[in-house]
């Protein structure tokens, strides 16, 4: 049999090509699912089942190699081999220990590299090791060891029989064909296999094509425009390594596409690439939107998606949301989807089990277990929060334990064990129990971790003790050498059954996910893998994922350039006129090179100088990676040329702390760059600062509440109505408040007495020693700085004519304001508006302003001011981060 390569000039008119009758009824493999969908929409002769992705077929043909069980066993095997390779005789520029650490830290990429070498069938004896980097020499040594030991987990099937090929084809068709098409299955010609649109080949794709060509005729099809020969040269560069002649289409079916907006731009770009500048048509103005940053771009996309969702609701959910979008967006850098996932998670496929709180529990508890000491070792306090908030540890009210833990976090910030945390909590409980109704309690009740009861501390201690017991049950038989994966996941299985499925209030959707996770664990039962604890931790991503439900895949809001070729062929029945938006068209995003396409530590140098292979598959793979940059350029031109709709172009100016330039081809074409201007929203209910809150009818307020109201309505809402106090939560504010406590203790002690700096300093030192146990997170340097800060403030604000001012009602008010705000608007540096903030008020003034009728109409809008940095509620307010100018300045 043979491999035959044909091209077609127009993807809308493949049926006009002379070979159409030969390919129309054959089994077909595609580069992507979007190409499958597009071809099925465009041609009645194609349908899903006859036309599938190459990846899906590979999963059936190489079912062992592509299975999760193999992936787990390969990771365990590599983890063990990394330990005993003799690196001393291999590396020169790094030590053997550094090599082991580097390889273990990058297990995922090491495995990818090894798999690529196996899939390419590289011969170790032909590799010129003296030309490799130290890391590449280590990879080759591991590869040799796996070959010499004939490791069964790295055995890739090579010689398929005709029956095995036919069985894989039948299995793929049966899995994909819909019921209404079952009568057509037998009519598919399985002796001719058609491959569509693959430019970026993986080694296993090439092995598949070679295996098929032994018993079948393989016909490869791709689009080629002779008018754009320099753009399409990237395809010829890749396919020239096949041992077959490329039969270029003699048809000229492209002309009708030039009538559309994108066709003229595509012509001009092709003319630049070919050097035919005289052929450029400058009469067509090219507009490009400039987004300042990725957040602004994601906001633009989110608005378009929200509008589509609104239309979907109005249409009574007749179609998916993307159906109603005016714009289909393709991005040269699709990382914006990571932002969009946060806001529209349901759009990106079924949520993975490990993304649920219970999944976070298993990740976090393994993160904290130290196999060397056989106990929990806390490197990140957030791991504890994840474990306490998932429902495994019992609590009366959901979220109670994690909330209490977060409030007390500064008490045990330097602890690394649960036992150490519990000791600190017991000390805190004793301290709170011994509080007397005096000034000391009044001082400390503004600190978050003292705003808690002894009973609540007991709840937290019990929760942490339970968590520690669960961890010990999980890991008591583990050590720092070999760990039995099967035994570990049996324990996880038991926890899911006993702690999750048996709960009556579990959501049915999540119950289904857990049941499918258990099904997967049943499938991998008895697996032989045994390796280090770090390796076991990494395999959780493979083990703990549910079997996917049909139709629950991701529907990307922003698609990548590899999806353009299929989407332009989709027939749309939507009443909304589509626009194709090609985004992230900067030099940086359009110029990703082959360096990004090889798994570490392999690079283009490895493949070009390591050996001189004669195998065509090797050359095709390496060339396709080298051509990736040109493939992106082709994908853009292709999308412009064949999109029969309106076109939008855009790029992001600032990314990764760098300023980007618009793609050079568009700059040469004198593209008109216009900064993005979001639509202004008049409805303040859509403004992030709008809050509607019902105040208790009988709430009473003080003049200090009125001061907060004058300063910032939002701050008044949080501190005076919700928390009913000013509670300092973060380390910076608590340290600032500690300085205020020292100041006021000194002012009360020395009231009216002469100011002698040494005596005052010594007194502050004594008081700092008295306070240090109440601030366990501070160090000696912090203490010294705080004392100096308090002394400096006293000199400037509490001393007159070398004597401490006597504390009367006015000074008591002043000290209370300082405790509430950590600062005061006072003196020459403040304008009248600011000075009015802290103006004393009578009870009548308070009741007239902070009355029910006034507060019912209030919308508690945030106000930017000089005290934002020292606001106890700043973590609940994004105002200070988005303020463009200081409060109080003239507009």
Image (spheres, grey):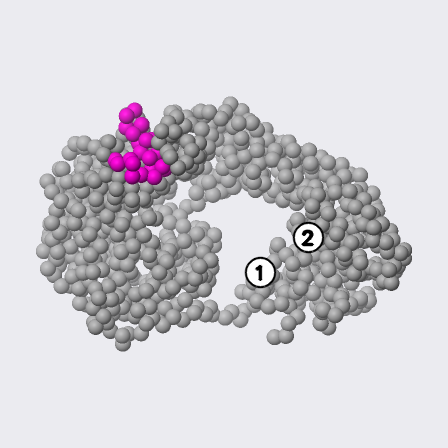
Q: Nearer the viewer, residue 261 or 466?
A: 261
- Quadrant position of residue 231: bottom left
Q: Is residue 140 magenta?
A: yes
> Which residue is denoted by mark 1 in the rendering?
881
Q: Which mark is on residue 533?
A: none
Residue located 65% across and 60% down the image:
868
Residue 131 spot, x, y in % from top left: 29, 39
- Residue 405 in view: yes
Instruction: Identify the disc placed on residue 733.
Output: 2
Q: Quadrant of residue 589?
A: bottom left
User: Up-down: is 407 above or below 693?
Assistant: above
| Residue 76 is at least partly visible in this image | no
Residue extending furthest toward the top:
477
* Label 1 Cα crowd, 10 Å radius (few <14 / some 14-19 / many 20+): few
Q: Earlier in the sequence, mark 1 or mark 2?
A: 2
Question: Magenta segment range?
Answer: 127-149
Is 423 contained in the magenta span? no
Query: Which quadrant is the C terminus positioned in?
Result: bottom right
């Amino acid at each position: 049999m043979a491999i035959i390569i044909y091209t077609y000039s127009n993807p809308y008119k493949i049926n006009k090509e002379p070979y159409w009758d030969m390919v129309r009824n054959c089994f077909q493999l595609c580069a992507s699912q979007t190409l499958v969908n597009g071809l099925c929409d465009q041609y009645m002769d194609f349908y899903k089942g006859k036309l599938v992705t190459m990846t899906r077929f590979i999963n059936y043909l190489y079912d062992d190699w592509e299975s999760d069980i193999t992936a787990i066993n390969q990771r365990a095997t590599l983890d063990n081999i990394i330990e005993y390779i003799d690196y001393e005789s291999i590396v020169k520029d790094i030590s053997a220990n550094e090599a082991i650490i580097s390889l273990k830290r990058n297990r995922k990429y090491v495995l990818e590299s090894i798999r690529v070498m196996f899939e390419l069938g590289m011969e170790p004896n032909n590799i010129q090791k003296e030309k490799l980097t130290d890391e590449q020499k280590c990879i080759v040594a591991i590869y040799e060891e796996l070959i010499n030991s004939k490791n069964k987990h790295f055995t890739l099937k090579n010689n398929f029989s005709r029956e095995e090929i036919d069985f894989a084809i039948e299995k793929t068709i049966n899995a994909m064909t819909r019921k209404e098409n079952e009568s057509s299955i037998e009519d598919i010609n399985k002796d001719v296999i058609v491959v569509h649109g693959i430019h970026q080949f993986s080694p296993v794709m090439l092995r598949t094509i070679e295996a098929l060509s032994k018993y079948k005729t393989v016909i490869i099809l791709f689009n080629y425009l002779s008018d754009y020969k320099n753009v399409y040269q990237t395809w010829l560069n890749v396919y020239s390594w096949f041992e077959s002649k490329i039969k270029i289409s003699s048809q000229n079916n492209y002309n009708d596409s030039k009538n559309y907006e994108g066709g003229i731009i595509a012509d001009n770009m092709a003319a630049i690439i070919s050097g035919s500048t005289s052929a450029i048509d400058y009469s067509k103005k090219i507009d490009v939107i400039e987004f300042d940053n990725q957040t602004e771009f994601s906001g633009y996309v989110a608005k378009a998606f929200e509008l589509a969702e609104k239309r979907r609701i109005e249409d009574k959910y007749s179609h998916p949301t993307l159906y109603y979008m005016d714009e289909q967006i393709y991005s040269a850098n699709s990382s914006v989807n990571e932002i969009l996932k946060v806001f529209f998670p349901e759009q990106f496929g079924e949520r993975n089990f490990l993304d649920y709180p219970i999944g976070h529990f298993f990740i976090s508890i393994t993160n904290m277990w130290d196999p060397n000491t056989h106990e929990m070792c806390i490197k990140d306090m957030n791991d504890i929060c994840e474990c306490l908030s998932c429902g495994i540890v019992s609590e009366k009210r959901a979220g109670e334990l994690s909330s209490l833990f977060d409030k007390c976090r500064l008490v045990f910030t330097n602890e690394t064990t649960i036992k150490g945390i519990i000791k600190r909590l017991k000390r805190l409980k004793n301290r709170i129990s011994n509080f007397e109704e005096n000034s000391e309690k009044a001082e400390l009740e503004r600190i978050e971790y003292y705003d808690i009861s002894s009973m609540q501390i007991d709840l937290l201690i019990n929760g942490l003790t339970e968590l520690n017991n669960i961890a010990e049950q999980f890991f008591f038989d583990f050590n720092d050498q070999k760990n039995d994966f099967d035994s570990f996941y049996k324990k996880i299985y038991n926890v899911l059954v006993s702690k999750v499925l048996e709960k009556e209030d579990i959501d049915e959707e999540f119950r289904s996910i857990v049941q499918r996770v258990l099904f997967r664990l049943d499938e991998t039962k008895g697996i032989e893998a045994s390796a280090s604890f770090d390796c076991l931790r990494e395999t959780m991503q493979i083990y703990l994922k549910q079997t996917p439900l049909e139709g629950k895949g991701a529907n990307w809001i922003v698609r990548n350039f590899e999806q353009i070729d299929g989407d332009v062929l989709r027939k749309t029945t939507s009443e909304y006129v589509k626009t194709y938006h090609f985004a992230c068209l900067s030099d940086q995003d359009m110029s990703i090179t082959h360096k990004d396409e090889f798994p570490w530590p392999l690079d283009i140098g490895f493949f070009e100088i390591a050996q001189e292979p004669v195998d065509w598959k090797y050359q095709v793979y390496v060339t396709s990676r080298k051509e990736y940059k040109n493939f992106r350029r082709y994908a853009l031109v292709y999308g412009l040329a064949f999109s029969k709709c309106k076109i939008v172009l855009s790029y992001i100016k600032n990314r990764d702390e760098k300023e980007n330039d618009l793609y050079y081809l568009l700059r040469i074409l004198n593209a008109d760059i216009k900064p993005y201007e979001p639509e202004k929203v008049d409805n303040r209910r859509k403004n992030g600062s709008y809050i509607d809150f019902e105040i208790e009818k009988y709430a009473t307020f003080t003049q200090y509440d009125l001061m907060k109201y004058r300063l910032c309505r939002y701050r008044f809402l949080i501190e005076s109505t919700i928390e009913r106090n000013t509670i300092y939560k973060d380390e910076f504010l608590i340290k600032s408040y500690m300085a205020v406590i020292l100041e006021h203790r000194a002012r009360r002690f020395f009231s009216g007495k002469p100011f002698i700096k040494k005596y005052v300093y010594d007194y502050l030192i004594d008081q700092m020693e008295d306070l240090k146990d109440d601030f366990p997170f501070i160090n000696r340097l912090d203490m010294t700085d705080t004392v100096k800060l308090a002394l400096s403030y006293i000199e400037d604000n509490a001393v007159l004519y070398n004597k401490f001012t006597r504390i009367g009602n006015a000074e008591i008010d002043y000290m209370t304001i300082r405790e509430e705000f950590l600062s005061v608007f006072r003196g020459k540096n403040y304008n009248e508006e600011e000075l009015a903030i802290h103006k004393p008020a009578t009870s009548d003034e308070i009741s007239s302003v902070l009355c029910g009728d006034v507060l019912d109409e209030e919308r508690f809008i945030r106000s930017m001011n000089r005290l934002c940095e020292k606001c106890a509620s700043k973590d609940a307010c994004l105002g200070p981060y988005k303020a463009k100018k200081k409060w109080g300045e003239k507009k």
